[in-house]
Amino acid sequence: MTRTTSAVARALERIERLDPALHAFVEVWPEEALAREREAVDRRLPLGGRPFAVKGLSGIRSYAARRLIAAGGVPVGATSVPGPGTYWQTWGQGARGRTVNPWRADRTPGGSSAGSAVAVAAGMVELATGSDGAGSVRIPAAWCGVFGLKTTNGLLPSPDRSGLASAGVLARSAAQAERWLRPVLEDGGPPGAAPAPAPLSPLPPGASSLPAVYSDDLGFAEVDPEVAAVVRAAVDRLVARGAVRLLERDAGLLDPVDAWTAVRGGAPDDPAAVRVRRGNDERLAALLDGGALLLTPATPNRPHGHEGPGGLYSTALTWAFNLSGHPAASLPAGFTGDGCPVGLQVVAPHGADVRLLAAARTLEDALPPARRPPAAGEE
């Protein structure tokens, strides 16, 4: 009789085979992972010993990782983040070298949840944890062609004292992320966490197309025309298939760059920062009124080379929602002509994390199936 290889064993085999070229991991824990899998199976825990990765060496201590382990998930290793002393534009440093994009090795995977995105895209794990203070989950998700979610700020504990960073996850799809996240989000977070306002339930049965507003630049970003065209084509497809109903609402925001920088630098009461935050909070309240979604490109640019983006902010379309605290996700929208993935960002009202997951699942069902990158090899 042929013995079935366990899910953790398969994940460890793929990591051993693929990571020498991709550099997604800084540490791998084979013995501990196999022991955790046996325990999860024996105890018949909900996740049944499914393998996942954690962002960085400290990720194993995160609230999300602890909840996933308690539900029977198995952490198999820690993924790469920017190396010490590097600028934020430097995306990932694995155990064997810099982390590369699985679609094009000459491009960055994005960051700072670099290795998490690569590990998921290459099929080394089903899910990886991340954290997002300016786009650190959504940008690598977009550039690696996977799904990435930033949760509502304050919903789950975060060690970031500025309040900008929020827990997140990366998975092959919103449907897969939703299955994993139920144990984390179903109770609305731990005791003492900020309460999650309604709606926290999935879309009602029989709901028609999702009300949404589309903006390619939020009124201030300089967006690569081809990136904008890929996302616009995806939105047009969503409308044509009845998944989305576009609303005529002003999606222009104030450029958050100086406000984000002030808050990150420990000056949240800076008058200019306060003005921008209040202005954008008012605009977003009107824009998302009634549960509407906001759709934008996840990044204004395509994956750049490992030398960095120069003066271009890859965060231009993401960090406004770290300031405002809204949940936001990136899902695969298509590719530029040079073979680089492009992400569609979806922003929802405060606390609507579970509803955002359900909406993202509806959107991805209406889009072409996400492809596996060449670096993933054969299954």
Image: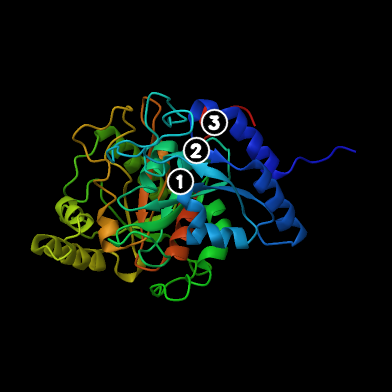
Q: Amino acid at mark 3?
A: Asp
Counting residues from the start of the chain, the first of labels 3 and 1 encountered is: 3
* Extreme residue toward the front, this view: 85
Instruction: Please tell me whether mark 3 or mark 1 is closer to you in this view.
Output: 1
Q: CA distance from mark 2 to mark 1?
A: 7 Å
Eyeballing the image, is 257 above or below 280? above
Q: Quadrant of the N terminus?
A: top right
Place residue 360 in its image quadrant.
bottom left
Q: What residue is shown at x 37% (from left), y 54% (from top)?
A: 346
Q: CA distance from mark 3 to mark 2?
A: 10 Å
Q: Amino acid at mark 2?
A: Val
Q: Quadrant of the C terminus?
A: top right
Counting residues from the start of the chain, the first of labels 2 and 1 encountered is: 2
Q: Are marks 2 and 1 in contact (CB under 8 Å)?
A: yes
Eyeballing the image, is 53 above or below 272? above
Q: Secondary structure at mark 2?
A: strand
* Residue nearer the viewer, 290 or 206: 290
Residue 188 image point, x, y percent: 47, 71
The residue carrying pointer 1 sits among few (fewer than 14), some (14 to 19) or many (20 or more) residues within 10 Å by Cα, namely: many
- In the image, taking residue 294 as reference, residue 368 lies left or right, namely right
Residue ID for mark 3: 19
Q: Secondary structure at mark 1?
A: loop
Counting residues from the start of the chain, the first of labels 3 and 2 encountered is: 3
Instruction: Please tell me whether mark 3 or mark 2 is closer to you in this view.
Output: 2
Q: Secondary structure at mark 3?
A: helix
Label at residue 26: 2
Residue ID for mark 1: 56
Residue 6 image point, x, y percent: 73, 44
Q: Amino acid at mark 1?
A: Gly
